[in-house]
Amino acid sequence: MSDSPTHHRHPALIATAVALPVALVVGIIVAAVLANRIPAREPIALGSVPAPAANGPDCAKVLGALPNTIGDYSGAKLAFPAPAGAKAWEKSSGGDPIVLRCGLDRPAEFTVGAAITQVDGVQWFEVSGKSQGLNSATWYAVDRGVYIALTVPDGTGPTPLQAVSDAISAALPARPIDPAPLPK
């Protein structure tokens, strides 16, 4: 028989030695899962629409006055080639962006007697996307020297219109509205 002392490890020390590496592995797995849930933000591709005044000074003033964030949305990169007079915001969690376009032609639906909504001193005309199967609405600022469209996802609330109205009011003076005559 051997007279050497036997070393007994305390159960708490053994439990800690086993639990520490397990906790580290679980933490790495959780971090990896969370990192994959936040998608990489790709530049937003915008199609071309007629915007004859998009490169003009009025649109430059409006674009310069726009906020970098609107509620939960932050400024987004536009894919090349980005149309003139455009800006977009998106949520970090993804989903449809908010898109502004400046220098557009008068919307065809904007005729005498059309309903107008005033938000923070700017008169807006709404075109719902529902008839086209879209879950968004486009609001047109119709009382400035240029037409400005703001497309917002349904359920976004009033914050985008308020923030953009403030920027438009700061950048451009109001003018009388000029709706198209009613078709005969």
Image: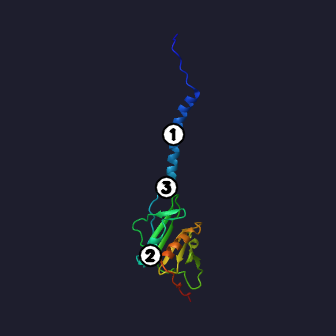
Residue at (53, 35) in percent of width and height? 20
| Residue extending farthest bottom | 184
Using a 10 Å C-alpha cutoff, classify the residue at mark 2 as few (fewer than 14 neighbours), some (14 to 19) or many (20 or more).
Answer: many
Question: Which image quadrant is residue 59 in?
Answer: bottom left
Q: Is residue 50 above or below residue 44?
A: below
Q: Position of residue 82 (x, y in %)?
A: 41, 68
Mark 3 Cα shell of 10 Å, populated few (<14), some (14-19), many (≥20): few
Residue 84 in the image: state x and y as whole percent: 41, 72
Chain-order first, disc 1 or disc 3: 1
Crowding near pointer 1: few (<14 within 10 Å), some, many (20+)? few
- Residue sitting at 58 percent across and 82 percent down? 114
Which residue has dot 1 on it?
25
Element type at marker 1?
helix
Query: Disc 2 to disc 1, how far (Cα)?
Result: 53 Å
The residue under label 3 is 39
Image quarter of the C terminus: bottom right
The image quarter in which residue 86 lies: bottom left
For the residues labelled 2 and 3, the Cα–Cα distance comes to 32 Å
Q: Secondary structure at mark 2?
A: helix
Q: Amino acid at mark 1?
A: Val
Q: Is residue 177 above or below residue 14?
A: below
Let me know if residue 98 appears in the view. Answer: yes
**Percent x, y of residue 3:** 52, 12
Q: Which mark is residue 155?
A: none
Identity, as a three-letter code, of the amino acid under mark 2? Cys
The foreground one among 125 and 50 is 125
Label 2 vs 3, first from the N-terminus: 3
What residue type is disc 3 on? Pro
**Residue at 54% in and 81% down:** 110
Provide the residue designation for mark 2.
59
